[in-house]
Image (cartoon, helix red, strand yellow):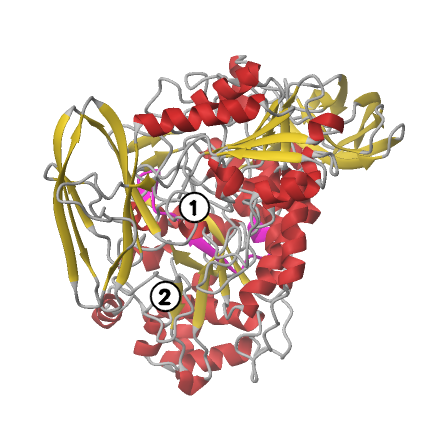
């Protein structure tokens, strides 16, 4: 038997060796409990214009690869012709194996060229519409292929566990069922277009704080009933790749966890794609490849030279390398990347992408509050409008970090509102709060210097040092805007904008990190004492030269901006006030309150004009002590490049707000699953415990009987709805739920009907008070009714038994709830669940 044949045989043995472990093992469902729509199925084939090689030819190709060539396929490298993407894996030209380009893309393809900036996934999820998720995915898939990419590092499926998490806008929901439905359809959409989807971050990467080091401790039942359901759905949808997380899971780094990667992902779920690490999340060579990690990104620290030496030294069998390469090549072949000639790349369809972006932004918008008919804007209220807030004038397209997209263009909400209000209307604008600062007066410093339009030639250095005097104590924000190497700015000897380490430096936010003209921005807020201060600035031109400016805001500037906003609000019949919160990868939020002086701004403006609508461009849930003063609150999250037009559509009632919250909004910062419990979040001593168990999100609020500010599933409409005639009966091991939804108002509207189930008294396991079991998005004309039928599968009625390592059916009498949110459930019934 040849060495090559021996390795191939070993590969097959390794591939078949995924047995269930005790900590994470999944295995089959319990007898009589079919897996339902969420369980593993046959992965759909991706479209390809040319025929793939097939298994035999992949084996033959593998035998021709040298060890150096094989290991080169298992890690990233610098791209000699980068397109601005996140990663690159060189191919093997002599054997026709092409390079792979991997781009970030939760809300659009992140490369150097423009792409459609879609609304944040959390806004998509708020539509409760799996078909729309597939359409969203198809835009990502087509654009990724058109922009020269082969792999999309999306979707992110980690649950919204804590409202502080910096990347909540990149993912979908706090609810496992809704998340699973949406991620499966998004993956199908991406891969319908021939792009490889990468579901991430496997697993329990639910925060940015300490993400590289935190050890997340979660019980087996907790894992399977919460975080893992979305990943299981991704595998069932045929995801081509999985990205391992930074954090540890139950004591072991996720990228070297055999229970996660080998026993669960491959052995129990049957995943046959490849597993890559998150960027710099690989911590070993032998342990990582032995656990089932196939690819280290973005470089070869562990899977380059060290892996080759491990093979030659005998600590890693070459069959393990072959198996990893085989998984990558097989997936590439499935998507037509090994075909000769390769499939032609499509052209970008920017117009189609823009249409989907606007559709999603409107569909997912959530009307949280609407008192006294504040919205929609009609009559006199639509003809005299004050638009207030910096993001009314500067479009807030998306969040920061790897989710950032260069859009084709994005209109300002002020422009869209003026256009929709039309001729004969008066739309005034007030800034309210200055995000980018005012020019420093040239004569502020002694000696004087113009710091507003400075240019430094290539290879030159410009510097200036001067003094200024304050007559009284004041709070200043100093800002530097720049196009090259960041200027060094010192105030009284202290450097204001030092280069920070790691992602904290690279990810500066989607709104605050760049000025409207594209210059990079950093800011520092300081309490300055009365007296003399010394400001020193040094700027280098570098190879290409650069432009920079130094700006500031003061207490007097803030007071003047606030006063102008109040005057503008008083002069108008209605106010639309845009509020923001700029989240980004690399850091968690430090507060659930709106940043800066926005709370004071809302209070003052709403006091001046009670017909104030607050439009929230925020990443996640927000506390609202100012809520009672407002007329309406519209949650738009990060609405993408077409957000301005979609916002105007909603404000004027051209579209009914059909979004519903996919996360609970707490009444205050203590009334959350983590208030006062640092071990749950952010962790203590590098250890974090998911001691809430299966009670994630709205389930915790129900279990603890805590009243939220706004519950999961909440969202208002411009019309009214009535639920009636509920019937529930056993059906195919599950339940068939039927009820009628009637539009009782005078407008066409959109409703999301939701079905929840209570616990089984016959199941001696921890269970939610109510679990989301189904939902249906409806659009009905005034006066019309629709009979809704939802089948609740046995899987939705089951719990994970850690002793049996399997799903077990919660049989017996179960209560069923139907309504408009997790807390507004007018219809209730009971039915007996049997195991057939």
The residue lying toward the viewer, choosing from 69 and 267, is: 69
Quarter of the image with the N terminus in it: bottom left
Residue that numbered label 1 is attached to: 510
Q: In x, y percent, where is residue 133?
A: 64, 48
**Residue span colored magenta:** 234-252
In the displayed structure image, the side of residue 250 where residue 627 appears, left or right: right
Q: Which residue does the image show at 54% across and 45% down from the upper left?
A: 120
Q: CA distance from mark 2 to mark 1?
A: 41 Å
Q: Is residue 438 above or below residue 801?
A: below
Earlier in the chain: of badge 2 and badge 1, it is: 2
Q: Which residue does the image show at 42% across and 52% down from the upper left?
A: 402
Q: Is residue 821 above or below residue 549?
A: above
Residue that numbered label 2 is attached to: 320
Element under disc 1: loop
The residue lying toward the viewer, choosing from 452 and 165, is: 452
Q: Which mark is residue 109?
A: none
Q: Is residue 2 above or below residue 15?
A: below
Q: In x, y percent, where is residue 222?
A: 48, 31
In the displayed structure image, the side of residue 659 where residue 451 appears, left or right: left
Asked if residue 681 shows in the view, the reply is no
Query: Splitting the image into 4 quarters, where does residue 422 fall?
Result: top right
Within the magenta stretch, is there residue 13?
A: no
Quarter of the image with the C terminus in it: top right
């Amino acid at each position: 038997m040849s060495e090559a044949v021996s390795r191939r045989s070993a590969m097959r043995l390794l591939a078949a060796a995924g047995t269930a472990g005790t900590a994470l093992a999944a295995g089959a469902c319990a007898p009589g409990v079919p897996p339902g729509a969420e369980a593993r199925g046959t992965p759909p084939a991706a479209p390809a214009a040319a025929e793939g090689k097939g298994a035999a030819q992949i084996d033959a190709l593998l035998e021709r690869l040298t060890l150096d060539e094989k290991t080169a396929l298992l890690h990233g490298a610098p791209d000699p012709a980068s397109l601005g993407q996140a990663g690159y894996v060189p191919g093997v030209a002599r054997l026709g194996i092409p390079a792979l380009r991997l781009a970030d893309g939760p809300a659009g393809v992140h490369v150097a060229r423009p792409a459609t900036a879609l609304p944040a996934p959390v806004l998509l999820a708020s539509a409760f519409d799996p078909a729309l998720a597939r359409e969203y995915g198809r835009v990502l898939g087509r654009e990724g292929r058109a922009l020269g990419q082969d792999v999309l590092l999306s979707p992110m499926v980690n649950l919204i566990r804590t409202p502080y998490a910096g990347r909540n806008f990149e993912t979908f929901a706090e609810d496992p069922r809704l998340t699973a439905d949406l991620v499966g359809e998004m993956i199908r959409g991406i891969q319908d277009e021939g792009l490889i989807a990468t579901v991430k971050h496997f697993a329990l990467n639910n925060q940015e704080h300490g993400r590289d080091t935190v050890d997340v401790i979660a019980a087996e039942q907790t894992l399977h009933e919460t975080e893992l359901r979305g990943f299981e759905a991704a595998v069932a949808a045929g995801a081509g790749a999985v990205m391992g997380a930074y954090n540890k899971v139950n004591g072991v780094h996720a990228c070297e966890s055999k229970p996660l990667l080998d026993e669960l992902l491959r052995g129990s779920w049957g995943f046959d794609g490849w597993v890559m690490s998150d960027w710099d999340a690989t911590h070993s060579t032998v342990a990582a490849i032995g656990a089932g990690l196939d690819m280290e990104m973005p470089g070869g620290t562990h899977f380059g030279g060290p892996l080759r030496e491990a093979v030659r030294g005998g600590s890693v069998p070459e069959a393990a390398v072959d198996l990893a390469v085989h998984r990558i090549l097989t997936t590439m072949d499935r998507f037509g990347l090994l075909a000769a000639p390769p499939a032609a790349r499509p052209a970008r369809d920017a117009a189609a992408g823009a249409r989907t972006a606007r559709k999603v932004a409107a569909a997912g918008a959530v009307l949280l509050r609407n008192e006294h008919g504040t919205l929609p804007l009609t009559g006199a209220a639509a003809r005299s409008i004050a638009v207030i807030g910096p993001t009314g004038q500067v479009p807030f397209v998306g969040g920061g970090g790897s989710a950032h997209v260069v859009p084709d263009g994005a209109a300002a909400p002020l422009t869209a509102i003026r256009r929709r209000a039309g001729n004969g209307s008066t739309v005034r604008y007030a800034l309210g709060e200055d995000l980018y600062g005012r020019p420093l007066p040239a004569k502020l410093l002694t000696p004087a210097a113009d710091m507003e339009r400075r240019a430094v030639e290539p290879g030159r250095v410009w510097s200036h040092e001067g003094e200024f005097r304050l007559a009284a104590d004041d709070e200043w924000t100093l800002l530097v805007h720049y196009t090259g190497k960041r200027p060094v700015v010192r105030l009284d000897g202290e450097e204001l904008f030092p280069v920070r380490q790691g992602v904290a430096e690279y990810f500066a936010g989607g709104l605050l990190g760049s000025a409207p003209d594209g210059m990079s921005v950093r800011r520092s807020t300081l309490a300055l004492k009365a007296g003399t201060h010394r400001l020193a600035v040094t700027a280098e031109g570098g190879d290409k030269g650069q432009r920079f400016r130094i700006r500031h805001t003061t207490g007097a500037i803030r007071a003047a901006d606030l006063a102008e906003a109040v005057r503008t609000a008083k002069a108008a019949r209605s106010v639309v006030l845009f509020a923001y919160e700029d989240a980004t990868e690399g850091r968690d939020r430090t507060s659930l309150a709106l940043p800066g002086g926005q709370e004071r701004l809302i209070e003052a403006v709403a006091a001046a004009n009670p017909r104030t609508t607050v439009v929230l461009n925020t990443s996640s849930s927000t506390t609202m002590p100012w809520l009672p003063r407002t007329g309406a609150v519209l949650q738009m999250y990060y609405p993408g490049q077409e957000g301005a037009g979609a916002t105007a559509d909603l404000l004027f009632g051209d579209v009914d707000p059909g979004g519903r919250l996919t996360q609970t909004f707490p009444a205050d910062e203590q009334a959350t699953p983590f208030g006062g419990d640092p071990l749950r979040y952010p962790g203590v001593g590098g250890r974090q415990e998911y001691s809430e168990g299966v009670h994630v999100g709205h389930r915790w609020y129900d279990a603890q009987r805590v009243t939220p500010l706004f519950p999961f599933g909440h969202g208002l409409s411009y019309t009214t709805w009535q639920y009636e005639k509920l019937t529930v009966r056993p059906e195919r091991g599950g339940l068939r739920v039927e009820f009628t939804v009637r539009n009782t108002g005078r407008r066409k509207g959109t409703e999301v009907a939701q079905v929840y189930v209570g616990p089984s008294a016959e199941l001696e396991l921890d269970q939610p008070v109510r679990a989301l079991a189904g939902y249906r998005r409806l659009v009905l004309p005034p006066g019309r009714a629709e009979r809704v039928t939802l089948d609740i599968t046995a899987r939705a009625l089951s719990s994970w038994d850690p002793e049996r390592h399997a799903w077990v059916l919660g049989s017996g009498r179960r209560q069923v709830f139907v309504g408009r949110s997790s807390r507004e459930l007018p219809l209730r019934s009971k039915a007996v669940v049997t195991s057939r």
